[in-house]
Amino acid sequence: MNTQSNQPNGSTKDDTKAGQYLTFILNGQTYGIPIGKIREIDRVGEITPVPQTPIYVAGVMNLRGKVIPVIDLRLKFGFEDTPHTRQTCIIVIEGLSGEFGAIVDGVSGVMGFLSTQIEPAPSLGSDSRLGFITGMAKTDNSENVVILVNILEVFNKDPALPENKNEAA
């Protein structure tokens, strides 16, 4: 069985191909990130706020002696801020120039998707802010859809994270 995703536009980006995805919840919706980008999952601990940063930047945290930026994906995606619960956690993601943490409402688990389960992201107008959505994965056991995201693209051209300091435009 072919596990490569053949996108209509010819794209074979790693973020849209079949494979294993860490799924997480934000505002009641399930999202997926390719498992290869994930370093670890931690409980929300001590986060030090940093002045003059965008509202979605929660601050920085000490991760085994290394200070990394932490963002709140709920706020970055434009959802209402809510108090953290026992399920709220930080996904530590390996970026191009270091690690960063992303606060999510909860982690669902790891799901594998075949190329036949992944469809390209629908056209949602000309809003370039939605370019981080790489596909829509249909789950086997329900009619739910998992929104697949390129987590690094979420912050493309955003100076708040180290990802964008060395990237070419």
Image (tube, grey):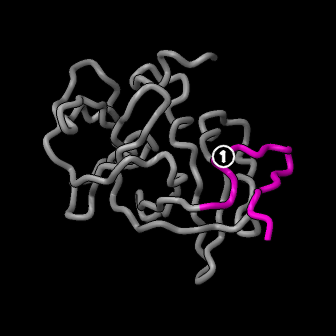
* Residue at position x 51%, y 49% in the image: 36
Where is residue 16? Give x, y as percent. 68, 51
Left or right of 55, for residue 120: right
Magenta span has 5?
Answer: yes
Q: Quadrant of residue 106?
A: bottom left
Label 1, on which residue? 14
Which residue is the extreme one toward the left? 46
Where is residue 4? Give x, y as percent. 76, 57
Where is residue 164? Give x, y as percent. 49, 21
Q: Amino acid at mark 1?
A: Asp
Residue 143 vs 61, above or below: the answer is: below
Left or right of 6, for residue 47: left
- Dominant SS of magenta comes to loop
The secondary structure type at the circle numbered 1 is helix
Identify the magenta region: 1-19
Placement of the C terminus among the 4 image quadrants? top right
Where is residue 48? Give x, y as percent. 16, 31
Q: Nearer the viewer, residue 18 or 46?
A: 18
* Badge 1: residue crowd in 10 Å (few <14, some 14–19, many ≥20): some
Magenta span has 108?
Answer: no
Q: Nearer the viewer, residue 36 or 125?
A: 36
